[in-house]
Image (tube, rainbow, N blue to C red):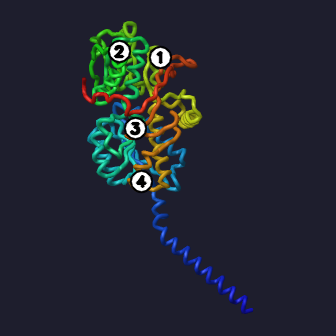
Amino acid sequence: MKGMEVKMKRVSIIICLFILVVSSLMVTFCPQLSESAEPVKIGAILDITGPVAFMGQMLKNGIELRLEEAGWKVVGRPVKLISEDGASDLNLTNSLARKLVEKDKVNIMIGPLNHDFMIALEPYLVENKVPEIYISQAAPEIEAKNEWFFAPPGVVAQCGYYTGQYAYELGYRTATVLGADFITGYQWVGAFTQGFEGKGGKVIAHAGWAPIGTVDYGPYLASMKKADVCAAWTVPSKFLVKQYREFGLWKKMPLMLIYTNEVPEADLVELGEAGIGLVGASLYTPRIDTPANHKFVAAFQKKYGRDPCEWDVIGYDAASVAIAALEATGGDTAPEKLRKAIHNVKIDLPTGPFSFSPSRYGMRSINMLKAEMMKGKPGWKIIKKYSAEPEALPIPPSSKK
């Protein structure tokens, strides 16, 4: 009996000690468990209205699809997307950024799209230690020293430079250029010039700089100097393409798009015969033949009833980077941990294997595309691929030259 009593006492002591240890652990970790139940907040400034509204909605489509695939959770924490419409207005964009950071307490910022706005916003986000995932190609001379800035789409030179190289490879030796009248337009045209003249070609004329939202390109086309090819990047581009045909310029010199992002396939379908034969560079086409892209295209078609375009996938990529970084931190949103995790992201995206360069720009393959009739409608066909590290390319000018 006494032996049994001793054993019972020992068991009781062990149980009590176990309860004490568990209670202690609960006290220790309860604050963290409570904190983990708080949502991760992703802020996004997207231009849903204004001259580039179609881009903003596409970016949002991609972001929401990726978060939906994740079940709106990461490592057990709910994810909340707080999206605001910047409407292509600098003052509004700055005001919304402050609201997202100071009131909503976002952990990551996606956007804004406009390069000029992003440059103006950078010091504020750095001061508040909010990692920024940019949603267009960027300029290394501006953001390279900002450790809180990340550009999954890469740098401007990646598409512009290789369009210039490819124009020369097609046999063109002289070019007239036309660009959008803001920093990104200057850089696209500058990168094309560097690639084209680096091969031995010559840009003989600038047709001008068209403001964002231009729909009448008549004044630019009427005075355009003849060359072997015209290379252009305008916002949007479908009006330029249509009017270029109507002016009869195509027969005198073919039109190349320095970057095809401004003519998604929906616009190609709308343009019909006017767009057939266009050539230009892109990060993405739904015809990229990889398992990850097949899965993405099927999911996108199911949700939105159409093929994805480049802006859709850029939004999807931005959300994918954010999710991968949060998974790496175990859901920890401490700014420094999150910043380092974003930089170290290595994932498989619809465009292929992805990682950041040392200066936080996406390592990307560049697709040269040609508009052709496919299955009864116009579409972008991959005709060549280029690949280069962002820092290995020349830096294009950020002003009119």
Label 3 or label 1, whichever comes before in sequence order: 1
Q: Position of residue 281 (x, y in %)?
A: 43, 24
Measured in 3D between alpha carbons, the distance from the residue under mark 3 to the one under mark 1, in whole angstroms, is 35 Å
Q: CA distance from mark 1 to mark 4?
A: 49 Å
Asked whether residue 212 appears in the rendered view, the answer is: no
* Number of other residues with Cα within 10 Å of mark 1, as a class: few under 14, some 14 to 19, many 20 or more: some
Q: CA distance from mark 1 to mark 2?
A: 34 Å
The amino acid type found where label 3 is placed reads Tyr
Looking at the image, residue 46 sits to the left or right of residue 365; the answer is left
| Three-letter amino acid code at the position of disc 1 | Gly
Q: Residue furthest left?
A: 400
Residue at image mark 2: 200
- Of callouts 1 and 2, which one flags the residue occurring earlier in the amino acid sequence? 2
Quadrant for the C terminus, please. Answer: top left
Badge 2 local density, few (<14 within 10 Å), some, or many (20+)? few
User: What residue sits right under mark 1 in the picture?
Assistant: 272
Q: Nearer the viewer, mark 3 or mark 1?
A: 3
Identity of the amino acid at label 4? Lys
Q: Which sits earlier in the primary sequence, circle 4 or circle 2?
A: 2
The alpha-carbon separation of the residues under discs 2 and 3 comes to 28 Å
Residues at marks 4 and 3, CA–CA distance in whole angstroms:
19 Å
Residue linked to disc 3:
361
Secondary element under disc 1, as helix, strand or loop, is helix
Which label lies toward us, 1 or 2? Answer: 2
Give the mark, 4 or 3, whose residue is nearer the N terminus. Answer: 4
1 or 4: mark nearer the eye: 4
- What mark, if any, has residue 337 been given in the picture? 4
- Is residue 174 something that shows in the picture? yes
Q: Nearer the viewer, residue 400 or 212?
A: 400
Which residue is situated farthest in the right direction here?
Answer: 1
Mark 4 or 2: in front is: 2
Q: Is residue 368 above or below residue 250?
A: below
